[in-house]
Structures are given as C-alpha cells and as structure tokens.
Amino acid sequence: MRDMVKPALKLFVICFVVALCLALVNSATKEVIAGRIKAADEEQRRQVIKTAESFEELEGWKENGQEGMIGDVYSAYKGDELLGYVFTAAPKGYGGEFKVIVGISKYKEVLGVAIGDNKETPGLGSKVAEEKFKGQYEGKSIEKPFEVVKGKASAENEIEAVSGATITSKAVTDAIQASAELAERLLKDGGE
C-alpha cells in the first residue's frame, strides 16, 4: 500500500503544478485572445460592407423571437448614414455548423458574403468559401427568396450549387435568406 501512495502523491503534485501553470497562462492571455477575436470579427464585417466606417451592435432584435440561426446583427454606418446591416449566421452544413457573415444594404440587396471556418468536405463543400460561389449573391435583391439549383442559374434569385456539395450550398443560402428576412423586418421597422 505504501508503495502506491508515494508515486500517487508525486503524480498529484505534478498535475497540480501543471494545472496551476495552465490557469496562469490562460489568465494572462485571455484578454489578448478576446481582442484578436474581436478584431477578426470586425475585419469580416468590413469584408461584407466595404464602404462602412463603423459598426454598431444592434440590441433588442432577439426580443421579437427572430433569433433562428442568426447570432448577432450590426448596423453599418458611413458617418451618420445607415448603409445596411451585417448578420452573423450559423447554418448546419454537411460537416456541421459554420459561420456565414452577410452584408445587406438599406436598399435591400446583398453587398457581400464571408464564410468562416468550416468542417465541410475539402475540395467539395469547402468551395462555398471561394469567390466563384459566394460572389453569386452580391448585388442580388433580397425581395425574392433565393433558390439553390443544380446546373446553371437562369433566374435572378437562383444560386448555382457547388457540384457535389448541395447540402453546404443550401446551408449558406438558408443563412443568407434568414439574414434577408430579418433585414426586411428591420428596414420595415424604421431602418435603425
């Protein structure tokens, strides 16, 4: 019994010291990591509404039961002028949930789309992050629902799916459609 107590005690002390060191490192770097995440999020908002000078988080929109897959909403401004909204959505694709950032103008058109980190199939579903796919949305009106089609898109509201990745293509389109519907309500309620 005594032979087991000494090694167990040594192992406990080593684990305690390592855990304490990890806690100290985490405490020291927590603010730096949070600052980098905030800067990365700001950069993604700038990617989808390039002319914006500032972004302001919109409060109170969840109170109307409008959450769905939308995580947060920002108003985009150039000076005092409202340019539109930036939505962060989290649809479920083939490889799980991923982040889609959507910029919609006050004139009800998609200004830009950014795709965050995802676990979609490399070479297939991951192609939704490429300009060839996400560029299809830019400049399109949100007044008609978007529709994912296999093959060439022929109508204004049609989006050509990535070949072999229809589930992921539909997930991105669902996120953009949810953003468009919320943008319609926000603009209808006064625009700010």
Image (tube, rainbow, N blue to C red):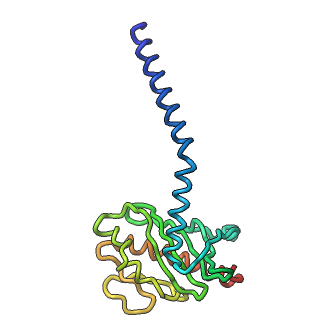
The picture quadrant where one finds residue 77 is: bottom right
Count of numbered circles in the view: 0
Q: Quick check: can you spot residue 97?
A: yes
**Image point (42%, 61%), residue name:** 96
The picture quadrant where one finds residue 129 is: bottom left
Spot occupied by residue 105 in the image (x, y as percentages of width and height): 57, 84
The picture quadrant where one finds residue 164 is: bottom left
Looking at the image, the residue that sits furthest to the top is 2
Q: Quick check: can you spot residue 65?
A: no
In the rendered view, does 189 fall on the left or right side of 110?
Answer: right
Spot occupied by residue 90 in the image (x, y as percentages of width and height): 50, 65
Looking at the image, the residue that sits furthest to the bottom is 155
- 171 vs 137: above or below: above
Q: Quadrant of the C terminus?
A: bottom right
Viewer-side residue, 186 vs 29: 29
Spot occupied by residue 3 in the image (x, y as percentages of width and height): 39, 9
**Image point (51%, 39%), residue name:** 25
Q: Quadrant of the N terminus?
A: top left
- 89 vs 76: above or below: above
Spot occupied by residue 161 in the image (x, y as percentages of width and height): 35, 79
- 11 vs 131: above or below: above
Viewer-side residue, 132 vs 37: 37
Viewer-side residue, 186 vs 154: 186
